[in-house]
Structures are given as structure tokens and as C-alpha cells.
Amino acid sequence: MPQKLPIGIQSFESLRKDGYLYVDKTSFLYALANSGKYFFLARPRRFGKSLFLSTLKAYFEGKKDLFEGLAVARLETEWKAYPVLYIDLNAGIYDTYEGLVNVLDSYLTAWEQLYGITRSANDIVQRFKNIILNVTKISGGKAIILIDEYDKPLLQTIDKPRLQERYCMLLKAFYGNLKTCDENIRFALLTGVTKFSHISIFSDLNNLQDISLDECYAEVCGLTTDEIRQNFGPFLEAFANKEGISVTGIMDQLQQMYDGYHFSEDTTKGVYNPFSLLNALAKKKFSNFWFETGTPSFLTKIIQDYQIHIQDFSNGDIVASDLRGKESLLNEPFALFYQSGYLTIKGYDKEFDSYRLGFPNKEVEQSFLNFLLPRYVGTTDNQSAFYIENFVRDLRKGDIDSFMERMKAFFADTPYELIRDMENHYQNVMFTVCRLMGYYTVAEYHTSHGRIDMTVKTSDYAYVFEFKFNKSAEEALEQIDAKDYGLPFVTDNRKLVKIGVNFSGKTRNIDQYLIV
């Protein structure tokens, strides 16, 4: 292999000096640095934000030699060095107010020592202002301010509103220096997962340009299909040889697993998750690399609190303003899932200024559902996998009785505290189980006469399910026949099986099912 894969490398200087492969994103860097002054960029975790900021740092420090052969080397003619104030909030633990103060203090102290600046006060807001004003005088160049994962303290306290409010007040004042010290600043970029726009952090920074949904910067983080083909040829060939398929075949599988993220209204501009793509090429295997690096424990609570139907993740609709920051992310759960990387833009309606969201790819959908299922029914991850395997065997054989009895056992041990809304809980579990079985599964399948709750297809069978809650299995079957739910499958070579199911709120389980 000509170069090493840059897995986990977030330092541009290290990447360039130590022989790692670099996909050239410096044309975006040059355009950003020369088109304005204050910017904000939101992207999911492990999507390359830190590397982009590190690249900007090297550029503004005038390290021309690091950019040899890259696009910016042909564009930049001055290579002026500026004082760079770089803050990375990603690694901090912010379970106490002092935790955030200590992290900020460590940066301020380092800059004061580096530039020989006398500590002006104990207040970190005033110290930051004093540093910005003085580095300009000392260095002769205006300050560059780069803040990585500015919102990490807020995301860590998303379920602690009082602590989060204190963080908001502190960060509003701290970041407010970007406006009060305007004459001493050449450029500033803040990155994070989301923009808390209406909780005052950005209320004073009305000159901040949010490029998170800007079509010009849709590909600034992540990797495009063309970039992968142009830069990773030997790695693709090695992976394809190991799998015994063509490079085209391996690209198709990589696309299904890791592509599909869209960060603008133009959904033709999609990017791959760079962390998963690089790990897949390095290990020559497909796995859920990105999802496994962070457990979104708060997701289950949000889904239950808002009684979200899991199938909505495949076809939810959300208005544009919801993606651009809200007073509280907990008031806009779909916005939170988008900004966290679990949903992406699937379409845009210009007339109504609204976005259609869905899972970006197979990795996220499978990982997300695998994560949710044990937390719905109180099993371990291994137990859930065992159940899914046996559900698949039952349906392949056409043994729906075993399937339903196994499903009843699945529900039997569900802890009471896991169930917020009985009917929604039951429907979400059924949908998640069927989706994980790997078959073509449609929730609330639309026909000309109504909506089928769920269909599951195997190579030999087409199953049509209708669910009732606190009614009867007979009523469920009657609805299948009355509304001709089986009609779309009459010409199908598979055997049609209709199943009416009733779930009892009293027993919190399936109390009756009928098969025709």
C-alpha cells in the first residue's frame, strides 16, 4: 500500500509528516478562509470536523510546506502566519460546572504563558477577551479562533436542564468575545453537532454564518464516491480480492453500508461516513464501526417520551427550521436524530421549505434497531440476537405458530418500567423485530383500501399482519379481508399467510392470534 490509512488521525501536521493518506479538502478551506470571517459548521461525531479544524490551524499558522501538492498550494500566494487560539472541548467530562471551567482555564493559562500575557482577572470570560486583544499586539496579526465541539458540554447535560442552563450562560459570555473583539479577529470557526440557536449562545453572534446546510460545503466532511475511487484504489482492490468479488462489487457494498449522508437540499451530493469507510478498508470487513464508538443511551428515552413510531424513521418529515437549531433539542427529537447522524436528508420540498428524513444507510439502520430492541424488552444484546435468529428460522419454514409463541415469550419478561405507552411499545417491538430479520418489511403498507400494519416476505411466504390492541384477533382478520389487504400479493409466487393479532394491555402480551 502506498500510504497508511488515517484512522483516528485528527492532526493535519501529523497526517502529512507521517505518511498517511490525505483526501484533499483544502479547496473548501481556501474558499471558507477568504469568503468571510465568522462561521459555524455542524456535523455528526467522527465525521472529520477535528481534522478540518486542524488543517485550518496549519494553514493560518503559515505552514506552507505541509500543503505541497494540495489545492490550496495553487490558490494561496501570501501564506501569512497568524496567532491561532484553538480550543477542543471534545475530550472533557462536563458532569460538574467546575469541569467546564477547568477545561477552559487550561487553554487560557497555556496561551498566557505562550504569549507572555499577564493574567488580567480570575474571570475566564475577561481573560479570554484580554488574550484576544493582546495576541494581536504581540504577534502583529489578528487572532484566529477555532473551537472544536463547542456544544459537547451541552450535549453531555441534555437531561440536566439546570446544569445546562449554567453552561449556556457561561458559554454565551465566553463566545460573545468573538463579537466584542471583532477588530482583533481575522477568522473564527466553531464546530459541533448542533446549533443551540435559541438558547442565547448564538443570540449575540448575529454575524455568524451557519454553513451546515450550505450546498457549497456539503462535502467538506465525509468522503464522496469519486474521492474514494481516486484515492483508495489499492485498498479497494485488496478488499475486493479478499471477498472474491470485483472492485465495482466492493464499492456497491460499501455504498449500501456507509454512504447516504446528505448535508444540503441537493440530495445528489452524498457522502460516506469516513470513520466506517476507513475501518472497513483497513480490516477488510463490513461492520458497524461508527455506531459502536458511541452508545446513544438517551435515544431510547426520547423515543419513549415522545411515543415515536420506529417506522417513522424511514419516512418522517421535518420542517427546515427544525434542522437549523431550536430552543431545546428535546422539543425536536427528529432534529436531534438528524444532527447526531442517525437520520439524514432524503428529500426537500421547496414549496413548503420542509425536509424528508430517513436512515442514511444499512450500518445506521441495523445498528440503531439492534441497539433499541434489548431496551424495549429487557433482554441482553445476545439474547435478542438469539431470538431474531429463531424468528427467521420459523418464518422460513412457514411455522407461524412457533413464531408467535416465541414472540409471546419475548414479551413475557419485559419490565413494566420500560413501557410508557402500551400500544406504541408493542407496535415498535413488532416492527423492529421484523426489520431486523432482514426481509423486506413494510409498516402500514398502503393499498387503495387502507393500510396494512406490516408485511414480511421470505423466499416462500408473504405474511400479512394486522394488529389490534385490547380488541380481538377475529377483528384483525376481518379487517384484512374487508379491506383486501391480501390483494397486492395474489399474483406473488409466495404463499400468502394472513395473521390477526391482539395485544392485551392487561397482560402486556399477545393474548390471541389467528392464522389463515
Image: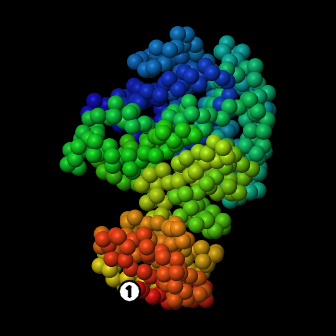
Residue 157 location, x and y as percent? 67, 54
- Taking the image as shown, residue 375 lies to the left or right of residue 494, namely right
Residue at 61% x, 45% y: name it: 349
**Label 1 neighbour load within 10 Å: few <14, some 14-19, many 20+:** some
Residue at 60% x, 61% y: name it: 298
Q: Identify whether 112 is placed above or below 248.
A: above
Q: Residue 14, can we see it?
A: yes
Q: Between residues 255 and 378, which one lies in front from this camera angle?
A: 255
Q: Quadrant of residue 5?
A: top left
Q: Between residues 468 and 160, which one lies in front from this camera angle?
A: 468
Residue type beneath disc 1: Asp
Q: Residue 127, can we see it?
A: no
Residue 196 location, x and y as percent? 70, 45
- Taking the image as shown, residue 28 lies to the left or right of residue 119, namely left
Residue at 74% x, 29% y: name it: 207
Residue at 40% x, 85% y: name it: 516
- Taking the image as shown, residue 226 lies to the left or right of residue 171, namely left
Residue that mark 1 sits on: 401
Q: Identify whether 122 is placed above or below 284.
A: above
Residue 251 location, x and y as percent? 32, 43
Q: Secondary structure at mark 1?
A: helix
Q: Quadrant of the N terminus?
A: top left
